[in-house]
Image: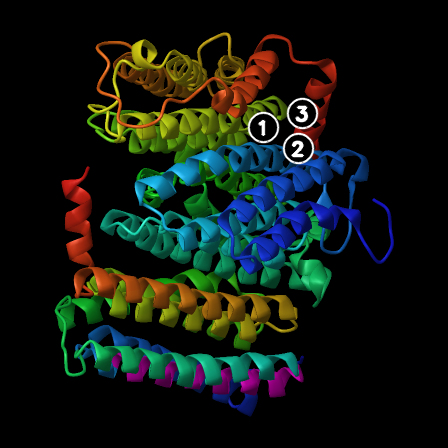
Amino acid sequence: MTPGWFNPVLLVPGIPLAGALLAAMVQDSRFGAAVAIIAAAGGFAAACMLPSELGSTLFLLIDPASAHLSMLTAFVGLTTAIYSRRYIAHELVLGRLDERRVRRYHVLLLSFLGFMLLTLLSNNLGIAWVALEAATISAVLGVGLPRTANAIEASWKFFIICGVGIAMALFGTVVLYLAALPALGPGYGAMTWTELAHAAPQIRSTLLNLAFVFLLVGYGTKAALVPLHSWMPDAHAEGPTPISAVLSGSVLNVALLLILRLRGLMAANSMAIDPGPPIMALGLLSVLFATFSLWGKRDVKRFFAFSSIEQSGLAAFAIGLGTTGAIFAALLHMTLHTLAKSAVYQAVGRAAHRKGGQHFSQITGLIASDPALGITLAAAVIAVAGLPPFGLFASEVLIISETLRTLPWLTPLLTLGLLVGGWKLMSQLVTLCLGPPTEAKGPAAGWLTMMPAWLHLAIIAVLGFAMPVAVANWLVAAARVMPS
Amino acid sequence: MEHIGFGALPYDFAHLLGGVMLLLSFTLLTQRRISATIATYAAQALTLAVAACWQGWVQNEPALYVTGAIAFVAKGVFIPLMLQRSLARLHLRGAREEAMGIFASMALGVALVVLSIMVVLPTTMQAGALTREDLALALSVVLLGLLMMITRRTAFTQVIGFMSLENGLILAAVGVAGMPLVVELSVAVLVLVGFVVFGAFLKRMDTHFHSLDTSVLDQVASENR
């Protein structure tokens, strides 16, 4: 990392946040949409430089894992901003949002993105906490933008559950500081990931255990791990669809990265409890619970929210396993799921506009009525279900084989969850895309508007079929950095 | 800092303030009149302000006075006044609300305090007595705030439960020697922004339902599932 008074790494969260300020000041929604795209593109461009800026300062930590997830988050932010322009314009036509709320939407999207990136890149637990809190508030306000009773209920629930979760995480941070105080002394050191990792063997283990519990509950809430997941289905079902697209991947990834770092810290202290089993238990519970919750859902977005809980649980499970192979698989899975799920939400959003509703009964026979949209959605759902030719097949197989190697007796449970979940996704795909088409009530979605989704799917396919050696090495490096 | 225990003024007074906060948490748990709940919350926030300033003096850490000032101005005075005003606007001044029975909530509250003492004291054997007791008291306040959020049904009192929980968090943060300013700042940001968010929600819910009962909202959700 280049030393000096100005750190170029700060541009990564800085550009989206500056864009949010700019969009907030100008009273024009079309301008806001343009600013959102430009700022998200700037953030992504800055994030692409991160691999050459590896290192750490007192407040910033750029290791392969955080650089990788930052690039991913910024990329999804960019495609979502591009997608949002038309989507939100149509919401304006439908009257679900007014001019003022549309403007506010772009501001919230950018501030959400900026604070997420800041959380990913921060070396200080306190700053990470503040940034995650700010991102949460942006997301809550975003979910509440449509003034329906349901959207208000969803954002209220989101705020209360995540507010309590994040409060637990702060308590955990205080306890962790207290645990590291004798080893590192008063000051910033005892709140800094890199310093904590160095001093891990000397940290007081009893307090570390206590901190672990609170931090796991706190950040586990943000990762939507069962039983702390209940904010997620409502937030997805009621908020604007592009918000679901970023919420489904980014928030989960940020929380999972924090859990991954915490896991490394715990594992480096021989006296502390083994962090693997609790994380694996929450992960496995999420996979099984979310899988069986897929039944009986009438709302398409709610349905896919449960699928996100399942995937987040799977990644958490792999993090809990803790071998380098499992962490590699977890990072790969998080990457691919983020791309696939945002493609799903982009297609579902279009379909809901086209058919005038987001229930399964309103959206059927998409391929017959809108081939472009139908095929996009089908491809994205196939990807999420973990079927070839898409990369999630590879990451799921990797996680299962790692389980088979380290904890064979858990393999049947995990495989059951994944198979049942995949099967249900495919059966709902048949409902959505095949069968007799329902009446169209909105504008058709052309091939062009599906470009961001296709870009995501192309990346997933390439990573599944023919992952470039450089990408594989990069992910291995990211997995190795985490002490386990 | 040398070892401080019973009989030393810094310890005794900090302990007393933490105890008062916990007592007020119990009061919050059993108080039925909404306006009295707000007043109790204000009293707890003012106690927190004194506790933060006391720690600032004991630890010779001027930053903690800022934390104290924030607790005093924002949480002890401004937020309670705002809440009382919107309560008056909604004609709810004398309103009482249903909650879990007094005996049941007291029993649960006591159980939570016992739990937090049993969790914190054994894990902090090597830490100074001041830190240990403070952390146990703070965790109790946090858990009681959580309990209040669960047992109450209106958005108003749930918000107060949440803010009382935050008081517990700050009590924990100020009790730890030399914690960098980051945390105080972050908590201040949280409270201020959180209040804005809550305010927005309450206003919206008001315009939509003319009622602050969140069970109405749950009904809306279940119809739409």
> Answer yes or no: do the residues labelled 2 and 1 have beta carbons within 8 Å?
yes
Q: Is residue A165 magenta?
A: no
Q: Is residue A51 left or right of residue A215?
A: right
Q: Same chain for the residues at labels 1 and 3, yes or no? A: yes
> Answer yes or no: do the residues labelled 1 and 3 have beta carbons within 8 Å?
yes
3D distance between C-alphas at marks 2 and 1: 9 Å
Q: Residue at label 3?
A: A475
Element assignment for label 2? helix
Report the span colored magenta.
Answer: B37-61
Amino acid of disc 3? Leu
> Answer yes or no: do the residues labelled 3 and 2 have beta carbons within 8 Å?
yes
Q: Residue at label 1?
A: A331
Which residue is pictured at 35% across the width and 39% down the height? A236
**Camera-nearest residue between A281 and A476:** A476
> What is the chief secondary structure element of the magenta stretch?
helix
Q: Nearer the viewer, mark 2 or mark 1?
A: 2
Q: Is residue A99 above or below residue A245?
A: below
